[in-house]
């Protein structure tokens, strides 16, 4: 079976949509995963489908109602938007991103009291989804560890998921704009940490490592990520995130991943 490649994006205006399509084609990606805050997403689904590219949505939703938000931020509102607007438009899948940066924040999922919200969120989307719709969960590389974010409702999200997507990034740009290595600074070390942390919550669901950040890593590192992905028997390879700063060589490296088998 060919390796399925997925390119993620955050913001997508008209130029960004054209770029995402071009980059997906160059990278030989079969799927794009677009943040659901983009107002053009609903109409873009059909445009990507015309090029035989599937479309997933993703979001880090809030756990508290946010009356001032115009982008269905609260989890219940996001689930309803996906079910009522995006799935009828042809959305092929959805990956939820429950995280926790600041305790008690509007988007802090690290509290077991959010378990009913997590169950309802997943149910709303999955009840509206057609056969073949893909549902998953992503979050920080080592969040599921007992000493990290143990109280995110992992069990509820995992039970609803077809696959799990730890953010096994080995490089990032911090809040001050500085580039720094994380999770050991290499694809192998990041994947090791992600598999270890997520293995404790996986409940026999497939774990798929994500590569990132795409504009900061090298082509050689992406090749190494691809080798490890295939070695682990992962059926997918995910890349976060598209932008105008992604080096052309990185897209070529992604295109070459799995070329011998697909």
Image: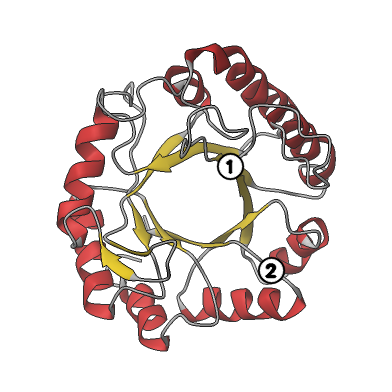
Q: Position of residue 200 (x, y in %)?
A: 25, 24
Quarter of the rendering occupied by the N terminus: bottom left
Direction from residue 225 to residue 133 in the image, left or right: right
Give the residue at the far front of this rendering: 176
Quarter of the rendering occupied by the C terminus: bottom left
Question: If you read the primary sequence from the N terminus, does the residue marked by circle 1 or circle 2 appear first?
Answer: 2
Q: Position of residue 103 (x, y in %)?
A: 48, 29
Residue of label 2: 12
Residue at left 47%, top 35%?
A: 100
Of labels 1 and 2, the one closer to you: 1
Indicate the quadrant where residue 230 lies: bottom left
Give the residue at the far bottom of this rendering: 248
Question: In the rendered view, how is the structure colored?
Answer: secondary structure
Q: Residues within 10 Å of mark 2 (few under 14, many from 20)?
A: many
Residue of label 1: 60
Q: Is residue 260 above or below residue 37?
A: below
Direction from residue 138 to residue 147 in the image, left or right: left
Contact, CB < 8 Å: mark 1 with mark 2?
A: no
Q: Position of residue 157 (x, y in %)?
A: 50, 25
């Amino acid at each position: 079976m060919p390796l399925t490649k997925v390119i993620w994006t955050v913001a997508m205006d008209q130029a960004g949509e054209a770029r995402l399509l071009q980059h997906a084609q160059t990278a030989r990606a079969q799927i794009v995963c677009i943040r659901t805050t983009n107002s053009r997403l609903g109409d873009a689904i059909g445009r990507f489908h015309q090029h035989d590219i599937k479309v997933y949505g993703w979001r880090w939703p809030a756990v508290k109602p946010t009356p001032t938000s115009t982008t269905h931020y609260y989890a219940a509102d996001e689930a309803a938007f996906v079910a009522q607007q995006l799935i009828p438009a042809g959305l092929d899948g959805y990956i939820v991103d429950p995280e926790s940066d600041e305790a008690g924040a509007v988007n802090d999922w690290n509290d077991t009291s959010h378990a009913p919200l997590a169950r309802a969120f997943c149910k709303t989307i999955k009840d509206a989804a057609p056969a073949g719709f893909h549902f998953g969960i992503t979050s920080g590389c080592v969040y599921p560890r007992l000493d990290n974010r143990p109280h995110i409702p992992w069990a509820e999200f995992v039970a609803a998921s077809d696959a799990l997507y730890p953010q096994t990034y080995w490089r990032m740009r911090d809040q001050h704009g500085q580039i720094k290595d994380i999770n050991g600074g290499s694809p192998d070390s990041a994947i090791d940490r992600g598999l270890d942390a997520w293995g404790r919550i996986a409940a026999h669901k497939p774990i798929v490592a994500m590569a990132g950040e795409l504009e900061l890593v090298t082509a050689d590192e992406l090749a190494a990520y691809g080798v490890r992905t295939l070695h682990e028997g992962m059926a997918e390879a995910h890349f976060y995130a598209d932008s105008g700063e992604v080096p052309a060589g990185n897209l070529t490296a992604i295109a070459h991943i799995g070329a011998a088998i697909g």
